[in-house]
Amino acid sequence: MQSFDFTAALPDRTQSENTQRAYFRWIDRYLVDRADLKPTTGDNRLKRMEKLPVKSIQRHLTARKLNSWLEELAEQGSSRQSLDQARAALVTLAELMAQHDMMPTHTAAEIRAVSVPSVAKKQTPERLLNADQLRQIMQAARDMATSDNQMARNAVVATMLCTMALRREELSVAKWGDLTVSDGNVVLQIADDVVPVPRNVLSLIDRWRKAMSSGSREPAAGSPLVRRIWKGGRIAKDGLSPDGVWLIIRDAADAAGLGHVTPDDLRRSAVAGMWQAGVPLEEISRFLRHRNTLITERFIARLNR
């Protein structure tokens, strides 16, 4: 069966790992929704992207089907940003397949002409959680665990997101080898930047490391920092997906009685907490990976409106 290696072709369009993962996620969802394939995650999703079934793509990736799919996503409440990204993923796939003579150029052009449906602007206000509310989320993430391993994992996930202003995608792809020492301090390598790891987070990571260690064996440097947990409490080899990371926070926020909390809410709240605690602007800028402190000043100014 003829297949197309999307992972090999995509870097010609984007070098961003976050964008590549997002494209893989949207294409996988499209194949589930339109081609009735089973959903995949982690390494299995990557393997699917390496061997996309050409005949199935040709049959199901059409302008009409893409348009109806985007309309369904809009009806389900997807944001304009999500719809734009979903469209871009499928358009990119069609164009790359056309370049490799695996799809007619006119079909790729028709797919490119599909526009994103209009989305009513949501009136949900942005939220800033105070320090007590962030602590409630971190505690709830522990309390809702059903095993010691899950408790250790949840503590790392919730505390890193609530205190380090990480994006869920960044935590999802973090490896054990990304934790290094710089000038005597432990830092987390994120792309070309490093983020300081607070002591309280480091102690939780050490507990999680002990839970993962088999005898005297330490987790491999290239293995995921946060992992899935099986129902029996056993730690899986696969890393936790961005959606899996956020499910922990969503459920913890709900358990804490805080209602719906978005990823942006949590990131803004972490920054606001740093600023209110007197953390220097330069250090906050490092956490946010901003190019300069002026960008950070503007970010904080928006929080105080």
Image (cartoon, helix red, strand yellow):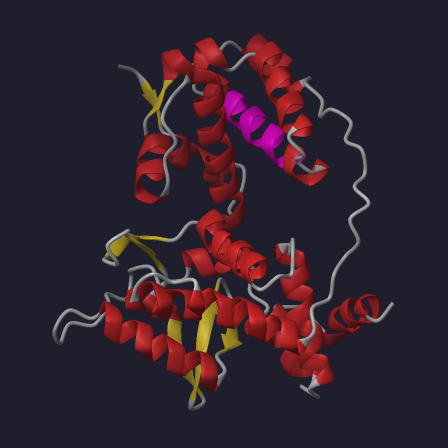
Image spot of residue 201 (x, y percent): 45, 79
Q: What stretch is highlighted in magenta?
A: 84-95
The residue lying at 37 percent from left, 22 percent from top is 37
The residue lying at 69 percent from left, 66 percent from top is 268
Task: Establish if 292 lies above or below 170.
Answer: below
Reply yes or no: does residue 156 show up in magenta: no
Image spot of residue 4 (x, y percent): 36, 24
Q: In which quarter of the image is the N terminus?
A: top left
Image spot of residue 301 (x, y percent): 83, 71
Residue found at the very far right of the displayed protein: 305
Task: Establish if 226 lies above or below 64.
Answer: below
Task: Establish if 194 lies above or below 222.
Answer: below
Image spot of residue 248 (x, y percent): 48, 57
Question: As rendered, which of 256 and 272 lies closer to the eye?
Answer: 256
Residue 193 visible within the image? no
Question: As rendered, which of 95 and 186 lies closer to the eye?
Answer: 186
Q: Main secondary structure of the magenta part?
A: helix
Residue found at the very far bottom of the displayed protein: 184
Quarter of the figure with residue 185: bottom left
Task: Establish if 201 lies above or below 129.
Answer: below
Q: Is residue 168 left or right of residue 229?
A: right
Q: In which quarter of the image is the C terminus?
A: bottom right
Question: As rendered, which of 43 and 95 lies closer to the eye?
Answer: 43
The residue lying at 67 percent from left, 73 percent from top is 271
The residue lying at 32 percent from left, 72 percent from top is 208
Residue 155 visible within the image? yes
